[in-house]
Image (spheres, rainbow, N blue to C red):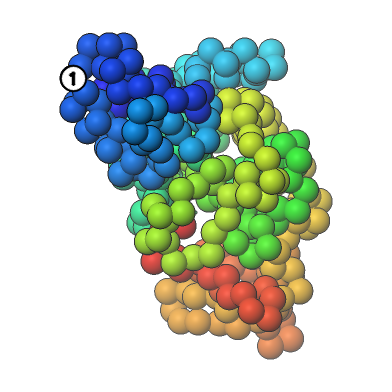
Amino acid sequence: MTLAQTILTLLADGEFQSGPALGQATGCSRTAVWKAVQSLQNTGLEIYCVRGKGYRLAQPVELLNRDSILAALDIDTRQAVQQLDVYYEIDSTNARLLEVARQENTSGYVCIAECQHMGRGRRGRRWVSPLGGNLYLSLLWRFHAGATSLGGLSLAIAVAMVRALRDSGLVSAQLKWPNDILLDGHKLAGILLELSGESSGPCAVVVGVGLNIRTPVREMSAVDQPWTDLESALGKTVSRNELTASLLRHLVHAVTDFEQQGLIPFMDEWKQWDALAGHEIILDLPTGVVRGVARGVDENGALLLARNGELQRHHSGEVSVRLSANMESSGTYGAGQ
Ligand code: BTN
């Protein structure tokens, strides 16, 4: 554990801790403690420093805890989760599990982190991953069939995320093809699937999800896409460990169901929560831009676009849409979210 990490653990309950008390607990000088507090502040955490009282977090933080997450899992999910690694900091949970996939023949491997230095978003973009209360989670899963059978998996994962969000009390999240989770046109969560292995034989998929739960505003200044977070939407604090357990349950069910039945068990919910259906959209393709009206998705996860009197199927592309009079939501996010 780094000194900053130890100090965050000591401050997590939101109570004041004096400099000398922190120095004594960590065996470090007051200057070292002060520097570690500053480094935590630089990552986006709000920490009050009050003369004569010491340091206190603006809000208590529930740190991710492996035992709490495992204890909150139902039996089926507990059996499916072969390994659960919790990192304080990491480059990218997806990158870590791609490395595991290359080295071990394991499935059901989960990696979560308090913050990522090189969080990856779709299309090579960056996923801004500050410390302080979001969720960065990856699940490594092996599929018996090849990669060609996985069309639509990312949509199934998006539905699983909305199911978990609904369990947490958020009933108004919507889906934007192929797999963004939106709330009133603002991005709440993103999904990145990365494949390891051959396209024909069995393959390993790393399912990466980034969920904004309590997002430090300053850290997000680089993100030029409207975004929101779960705690603001719910108006209350969220237990990250319980939410992680619930999300894992839904993800494990989703990959299992998808492997057996494809996208069919997810279609009704996609239809219900589809943010694009009926909207005039712009689809940015490698060959140019096309406009049309979104008409849902097919069983392979393709976007259905009504255009020039015909229904076209698109398997890739970036969508922009005007969801309301003053809100432009685009798939092109600059810094990444
Ligand atoms: C998107 O661009 O919408 C997808 C973002 C996916 C971010 C998650 S955070 C956990 C996992 N690790 C990463 O590096 N990326 C994914």
Asked whether mark 1 and ligand 1 are closer than 8 Å, the reply comes as no
Residue 29 picture location, percent across and down? 18, 19
User: Which three-letter amino acid code belongs to the residue tagged 1?
Assistant: Ser
Q: Is residue 15 left or right of residue 294?
A: left
Residue beneath disc 1: 29
Q: Does the image show residue 184? A: yes
Relative to 114, say whether 10 is above or below.
above
Residue that extends furthest to the bottom in the rendered view of this protein: 308
**Picture quarter containing residue 56?**
top left
Q: Residue 337 or 277: which is nearer the viewer?
A: 337
Q: Which residue is drawn at 60% across and 83% down?
A: 291
Relative to 29, say whether 334 is above or below.
below
Residue that extends furthest to the front in the rendered view of this protein: 52
Secondary structure of the residue carrying tag 1 is: loop
Q: Which residue is drawn at 38% across and 35% down?
A: 50
Q: Residue at x 33, y 15 (%)?
A: 21
Q: Residue at x 67, y 32 (%)?
A: 250
Task: Tell me the quadrant of the picture where the N terminus can be found.
Answer: top left
Q: Residue 132 or 203: which is nearer the viewer?
A: 132
